[in-house]
Image (tube, rainbow, N blue to C red):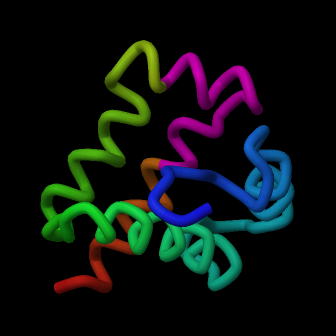
Amino acid sequence: MRGRWRYGARPDGEAGVAVAAAAASADVEPVQAEVDTQYRGLSEMRTPSAEEYRAIGRACVNNEVWRTAYESIAPGLAEYQRQAIEAYANRLR
């Protein structure tokens, strides 16, 4: 999906949840590959700095609408997504 925020290969996020469920940590390569796809999608509009991307990750948890959307896919997914984005942003330095 070019130019669209996504988690996983399908709009319902099922593939992303499968990657998350199979991973012990948000910084493992399959998870980081998903986050890289998301980052590249955002970069088609404007490339966020590492700190801006971290802020997006925090919004997954702190923004009630976003948190509800993630948690409706799988409990704990909002925090997991925040952790995955944080790990990715650390690589951007």
Instruction: State the image quarter where residue 20 is shown.
Output: bottom right
Residue 49: image x %, image y %?
A: 14, 69
Q: Is residue 62 left or right of residue 65?
A: left
Q: Main secondary structure of the magenta part?
A: helix
Q: Residue at x 72, y 28 (%)?
A: 75
On screen, residue 66 above or below 45: above
Q: Residue at x 70, y 79 (%)?
A: 30
Q: Is residue 52 left or right of residue 30?
A: left
Residue 52: image x %, image y %?
A: 16, 56
- Tag count: 0
Along the viewing direction, whichever of 54 and 9 lies nearer the viewer: 9
On screen, residue 65 above or below 60: above
Residue 6: image x %, image y %?
A: 59, 52
Image quarter of the N terminus: bottom right
Residue numbers of the magenta segment: 67-81
Q: Is residue 8 left or right of residue 93?
A: right
Residue 93: image x %, image y %?
A: 17, 85
Q: Residue at x 25, y 55 (%)?
A: 54
Instruction: State the image quarter where residue 48 is shown.
Output: bottom left
Residue 68 in magenta stretch: yes
Q: Residue at x 61, y 31 (%)?
A: 70
